[in-house]
Image (cartoon, grey):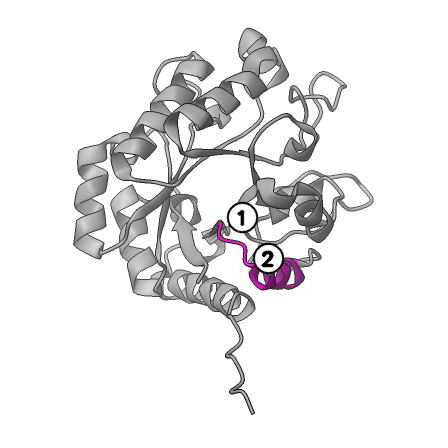
């Protein structure tokens, strides 16, 4: 059965401990930890304590690759990636999620594919490169190097994010087919394509509330015997301080995942 986890980003900016608590209450199989500016998100002793308290394993670690985490573990992105792999190893996590580098990250960007492949093969942990989306930097949409689509990169493992696919104007089902055996990880969410005014907003809607073929993709992967991880990464900020509403949103997301990854019962032979 495919494991369904919850990213700590679903409850950001709440503490990591609260994310574990909510994930347990919602019924998830485990947690993806987004390494952030909060010390507990990168402290293996704290993470082990949360895991034991709430009975949830750390399934995956998301590297600190966002702009607000640019000073977490120093400023050298290659060293940050290595430390993420070390944390994943300490926690027994199967996967590290990493974004393609920003174009301005110099030698890290030019050596990214080589480093990711080397670290994955040395550690035995999947370094699943996540699909991103174009956005403007000084009049250019080429913010990432070597690009936004890991399917076109020389890497062994890929993360497919449905919201990012929407912003790129891509069909996530087609992307899953094209990724083939390299697809190891899903960020479960949804999104619409940019509107006519080309406003850019990474929505991370609940699955089924956007325009991506999320259910079709999950069903295809399940029917093909896929054994990767599905991690809920939905925006629950609309709940504000209503924790019952937030929990309901996360339970609905899990129910969607369970429904579309259910293995049909075998019919008895006549």
User: Which residue bears the numbered disc 2?
Assistant: 221
Which residue reaches farthest front?
270
Instruction: Say if the magenta span includes residue 64.
Output: no
Per the rendering, the mark at residue 15 is: none
Viewer-side residue, 122 vs 116:
122
Quadrant including the N terminus: bottom left
Q: Which stretch did the figure color magenta?
A: 214-228
Q: Are marks 1 and 2 in contact (CB under 8 Å)?
A: yes
Q: Secondary structure at mark 2?
A: helix
**Measured from the top left, where is residue 164 in percent x and y?**
63, 42
Seen at 60% across and 44% down, the residue is 181
Seen at 66% across and 20% down, the residue is 146
User: Label 1 to label 2, Cα distance in Å?
Assistant: 11 Å
**Measured from the top left, where is residue 221 in percent x and y?**
59, 57
* Sequence-earlier tag: 1 or 2: 1
For residue 143, say whether it is visible.
Answer: yes
Per the rendering, the mark at residue 186 is: 1
């Amino acid at each position: 059965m495919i494991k369904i986890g919850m990213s700590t980003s679903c409850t950001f900016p709440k503490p990591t401990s609260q994310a574990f608590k909510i994930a347990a209450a919602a019924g998830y199989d485990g947690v993806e930890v987004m390494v952030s500016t909060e010390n507990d998100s990168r402290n293996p002793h704290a993470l082990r304590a949360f895991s034991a308290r709430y009975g949830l394993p750390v399934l995956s670690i998301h590297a600190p690759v966002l702009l607000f985490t640019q000073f977490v573990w120093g400023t050298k992105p290659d060293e940050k990636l290595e430390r993420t792999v070390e944390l994943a190893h300490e926690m027994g996590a199967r996967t590290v999620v990493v974004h393609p580098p920003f174009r301005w990250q110099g030698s890290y960007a030019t050596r990214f594919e080589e480093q990711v492949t080397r670290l994955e093969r040395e550690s035995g942990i999947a370094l699943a490169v996540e699909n991103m989306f174009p956005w403007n930097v000084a009049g250019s949409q080429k913010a990432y190097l070597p690009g936004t689509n890991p399917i076109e990169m020389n890497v062994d493992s890929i993360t497919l994010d449905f919201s990012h696919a929407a912003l790129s104007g891509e069909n996530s089902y087609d992307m899953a087919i094209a990724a083939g055996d390299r697809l190891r990880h899903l960020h479960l969410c949804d999104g619409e394509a940019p509107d006519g005014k080309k406003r850019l907003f990474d929505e991370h809607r609940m699955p089924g509330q956007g325009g991506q073929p999320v259910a079709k993709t999950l069903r295809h992967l399940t029917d093909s015997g896929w054994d990767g991880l599905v991690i809920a990464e939905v925006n629950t900020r609309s709940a504000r301080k209503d924790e019952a509403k937030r929990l309901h949103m996360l339970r609905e997301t899990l129910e969607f995942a369970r429904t579309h990854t259910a293995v049909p019962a075998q019919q008895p032979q006549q």
